[in-house]
Image (cartoon, helix red, strand yellow):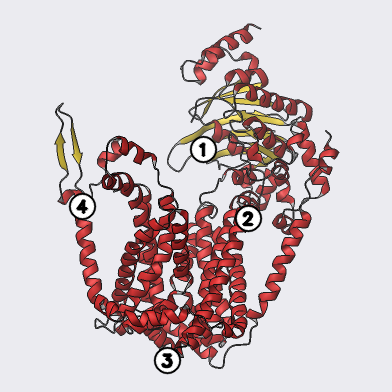
Amino acid sequence: MTVMEQLQAEPKNLWKRIVLFLVLLAVVAWGSDSITYNGIAQQGSVVASGIIHGITHPNLELLFNLTDAGVPYLILQTIAIAILGTIFGAILAIPISFLASTNIVPKWIAYIFRSLILLIRTIPSMVWALVWIRVTGPGAFCGVVTQSVCSIGMISKMYITAIEDLDTGILESLDAAGCNTFEKIRVGILPQLSASFISTAIYRFDINLKDATTLGIVGAGGIGSPLVQSITYSRWSNVGSFLWALIILVLIIEYISTRIRNRLARGHR
Amino acid sequence: MPRAETKKVPLFDRVFKPEHIVLENGNSVDRPRSRMPLILICLIAVIIISLKMTGFDFNVIIRRAKELTVILGQIFRPNFGYFPNIVKPLIETVKMSIIGTIAGCAIGLPLSIFASSNINHNKPTMLVIRFILSVMRSVPTLIYASVLALVFGLGTFAGTLAITVFTVGIVAKMLYESIETIDMKPYEAMISFGASTLQAFWTACMPQILPTYIDDCLYCFELNIRASSILGYVGAGGLGVLIRERTGLRAYNDLGMVLLILFTVVLVIDLVNDHIRSKIM
Amino acid sequence: MIEFKDVSKTYPNGTKGLQHVNLEIEQGEFVAIIGLSGAGKSTLIRTINRMIDITDGQLLVDGTDVMTLKGKDLRRFRRKIGMIFQSFNLVSRASVIKNVLSSNVPDMPWYKVLFGVYSKEQKIHALEALDKVNILNKAYHRCDELSGGQMQRVALARTLAQNPSIILADEPVASLDPIMADIVMSDFAKINKEMNISILLNIHHVDLALKYATRVIGVRAGQIVYDGPASQVTQDVLDQVYNGKAVPKSTDIRTEAEAEA
């Protein structure tokens, strides 16, 4: 084989790349009218300078106000919503995800529960909140219920992966040791799943914390509703304090949850 | 291991002394006390406080469950006749997510290079970029959208911008985490024969992270479709406008149709993405 | 020509990598550097293309003071020095020819780098380099499909494609089995003779070093303890280099045999 022969033999994928590039270009061209810039809105520059002023000059009184309109209480309430939403969601997800795992139940049952999970996942959490608000009335309670339901979707999806990865060899050895079903679940299955289940729940807690703010917009409690109200009524220094509190809260929680999940992954107590 | 002995004893083990077990043959072993009871007590306390704080009341759910079934009942009987009204906002939503995702992923890539500790050896710039990325991620898309809608006027421009900002934060984080796990040896080789940092990164590292990068972009696209569908709630265009309007009017059959369409679109996109993933992996 | 003038390297943690090294290496020499792990072999090799900065003394390569180079000049200087690594350092997901072509990247405009487009001449040049190390038929295979020996030859081809005047090799055969190691070493010898490229390599296999190299440098604790022709390396020299520790049996026999011859 000579060099020139090999040069001829080069696999040609230039066309494939050009086509791919053109497709991408076409998609961008089609979508680009979503970014037609219509200039800044009438009050736009005022809003922009207002928000910058608000962030640099947050309302300190609000930041250290200890009543239930102050930032500390709202932050705690947001955390409380996320905690309860996550815990309820994580518990509700356990039976659902076992019933949706193909290695536990027959395939057709698993697919019924999988479509249920998909349904929960697809409906945006805000829509869930709008539905639940008719039951619970506006407030933090609505946030908890909404997050409990919404969390089921993603948590179950990750639980199922963990369940389907179960090492069933252990169950055989426990069978051989004469264990009954309960003992098999306690000794053979739980230790395998608990770390990844807890890790999933903590991960979801992160998401719920951010989501709780979004839910506040439709009136489901937490720091979201006063934040959006302040935006609507142009109280920029209040917006500044809420945003600072929110950012710091999320950064701290993200840091802690990453550390805990890393420890769980390494198998530390 | 001399290091292990000098290691600081955690506070917990100093308060609750480890159980000292002496075996029959005289060997001994320290069994640290389980942290489980303490964790459980804290958890229960936190739950009780949270229940108080949020005004959680299970009875209300039982008592008023009928409301839920009525609304859900209407949602699950979608009004198919409403479909023509959905098309335009649906296209808006899809466009916002496509452009937002592409722009966000394009901006996120260079940022992630400068946020990776193994490529950028200038620690201050690395930490500053990481911090900015965290801040970008910590504000929900909807808040961005509500502010941007006030600045740029109602419509898709604000929504697209909000999605872009959020995507940058999330894609850059996922990317720098995967960049930090790649094999740096080809990079070292390229540096050894005279390539600059960016040349070496692009030629030696990019082929390694390309599949992950595409996967991350697709994941963001899935997230963004869901996120952009509600942005209209604060006036940033797309399906959210309808969601707000229809729930306000209690026209839950129409809402059901909107959700059905959204569900279908998400499903199709997930399937297409899974197909692309199976091709590139 | 490579000149070390009283070169020392102290790492930030206080470890002494090199101490007062004086060396002169002519163009076209085949130098094997032997010594224990941690003796400073890698440091010695890597200071030449400034992958490691020296802390004292002067290091001249073809009359250029290496420590004065910065940014673009340093990168241009590195173009004429090839480097081979123990673990090959190839992009395993990319094809063989893409890896060889990557040696052109430093000279290419950014948009060509961005899209990874190479000219026909570059491709022919890369294929010729692959031909020189007898691996032309694998040009369009992915690197992770190759064996260790084949990968090291791809790395060698990548280095040849940049037309270096010096090749530095940091433990090039340490990850290979004995037969492959011998083949790769003979490739080095062939390149050294046919193309008059200086070759400096670190090696643990004393027998291979003596078989192929023309000059041997023994390093111990950052100092040069032997510097001379391969034919004059005796057991005493090895004892000194390896700090009196026993050298593996097979090497003993070969060394004695060659010393007698």
Q: Nearer the viewer, residue C60 or C131?
A: C131
Alpha carbon separation for disc pair 1 and 4? 44 Å
Amino acid under disc 3: Tyr
Q: Counting other residues with Cα less than 10 Å from the Cα at mark 1, is it few (<14), some (14-19), or many (20 or more)? A: many
State the CA–CA distance, disc 4 to disc 2: 47 Å
Identify which residue is drawn at 58% across, 71% down.
B265
Q: How many angstroms separate mark 3 from mark 1 (CA)? A: 66 Å
Mark carried by residue C9: 1
B3 left or right, relative to A33? left
**Disc 1 secondary structure class:** strand
Tag 3 residue: A233
Is residue A132 at all visible to an observer of this figure? no
- Residue at image point 66% right, 49% down: B195
Q: Secondary structure at mark 3?
A: loop
Judge whether A180 appears above or below B198 on screen: above
Labels 4, 2: one chain: yes
Q: Where is residue B127? Give x, y as percent.
A: 46, 61
The residue that label 2 is drawn on is B198
Mark 1 or mark 4: which is in front? 4
Which amino acid is tagged 2?
Leu
Q: Secondary structure at mark 4?
A: helix
Observer-nearest residue: C254 or C175? C175
Query: Quick check: marks 1 and 4 in contact, CB under 8 Å?
Result: no
Most extreme residue toward the top, as rendered? C260
Q: Position of residue A246 (x, y in %)?
A: 38, 74
Q: Are marks 1 and 2 in contact (CB under 8 Å)?
A: no
